[in-house]
Amino acid sequence: MTASARSTAAPFTAGDYAARRERVIADALAAGLDGGLLVTPGPDLTWLTGYRPTAITERLTLLVLSPHREATLLVPLLERPDAEAAAGTASLELLDWTDGADPYAVAAALLDPAGRFGISDSAWSMHLLGLQSALPSTRYQALSPCLPMLRAVKDDNELARLERAGAAADAAFRAVVQLRFAGRRETEVAADLARLLLELGHEQVDFTVVGSGPNGANPHHEAGDRVIREGDAVVLDFGGLLDGYGSDTTRTVSVGEPDPEVVRVHGIVREAQQAAFEAVRPGVPCEEIDRVARAVITDAGYGEQFIHRTGHGIGVTTHEPPYLVEGEARELRTGMCFSIEPGIYLAGRFGVRIEDIVTVAAMGGRRLNTTDHGLTVVA
């Protein structure tokens, strides 16, 4: 990591995590979850406590957020030292259980025996069934449908981390387009992108899509052994985590002189991306951003070739709510962060996608990716 890429993020404090927990308990009550929330290992647990178990095993780890008692994190005894070291656990009660004990009996003592709970989408079925067996009158709902915007609004510290992640991803793009594409396999360019992301500060690389020629028509193409050729359009979609927060950007480049239809399609996608960005402001329904981008592409005659939603949220994971898709009527709020990434995909020929991460500011949208939207020509 270069000196300029070293983390300068202000650490989250125990008070930051406590404030998040207080807010989501209030949100849970408003959603009719009178028992509160049960959070198992995953991004929600990390966001609420700072604790990320080194290994997710069959042993029950459970954060109980209840309106009736202090926030409590239940962990296996052998993992307690790691939990104690997390920044957010100093402001909650920490309990442990030992191998040979019944963890569901321990958890049951923390729960309203007739409560309705939101539980992590990724909770293991054995844990949910164990809780139901211990407390047959409790009821459970998956957390995302109840509180889909749990982590959607970012504070200033989170926004700063996302901005740094976006800047590092931009730097990786500027560096990779200086390298040779023609005559190299997609996997080699993907390896360059992964290396650059890590060199520029990312602690984790989540994906490096390199879709050349006809492979670009598959939005989530896994980089393969296809040799990139002169004249190919190449979709580059890559990102990961820096300071615990995500980056995700896409640009489409041309290897040598671009085909006229690639130029035309790229211009349409660029127009759609810009129109969607200009539609961002507080109070606008999420689905409206999708409609704006889709209208541009449909009017140009490529509506059936835009085969995915316009965007997704980003934070401690690279894909999370809010989703910019038809049917999502929830309104944008200041501090939300998401991708805007329209695309056109011509099967067997090529694809084009342009993606920026955007945050909602008081007067509109602000891009966290700033690389040129033009069709970059590479060697």
Image (spheres, grey):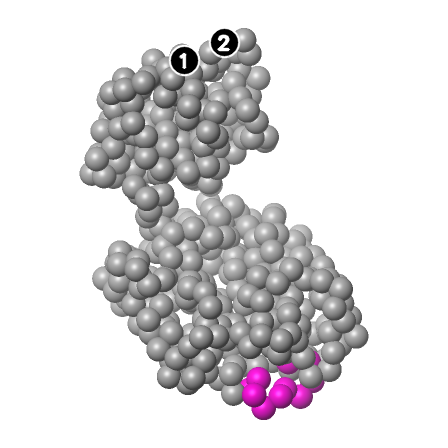
Q: Residue at x 52, y 34 (%)?
A: 52
Total numbered labels placed on residues in the image: 2
Q: Is residue 63 left or right of residue 8?
A: left
Q: Residue at x 35, y 77 (%)?
A: 295
Q: Is residue 258 left or right of residue 103?
A: right
Q: Nearer the viewer, residue 378 or 61?
A: 61
- The residue lying furthest to the top in this view is 100
The residue wearing badge 2 is 101
Q: Residue at x 52, y 87 (%)?
A: 264
Q: Nearer the viewer, residue 274 or 174?
A: 274
Check disc 1: other Cα within 10 Å, few if <14, some if 14-19, many if 20+.
some
Up the image or down, 100 lies above or below 231; here it is: above
The residue wearing badge 1 is 106
Query: Residue 22: where, in percent of width, then height?
Result: 28, 34
Query: Residue 320: where, in percent of width, then height?
Result: 43, 51
- Disc 1 marks a residue whose amino acid type is Val
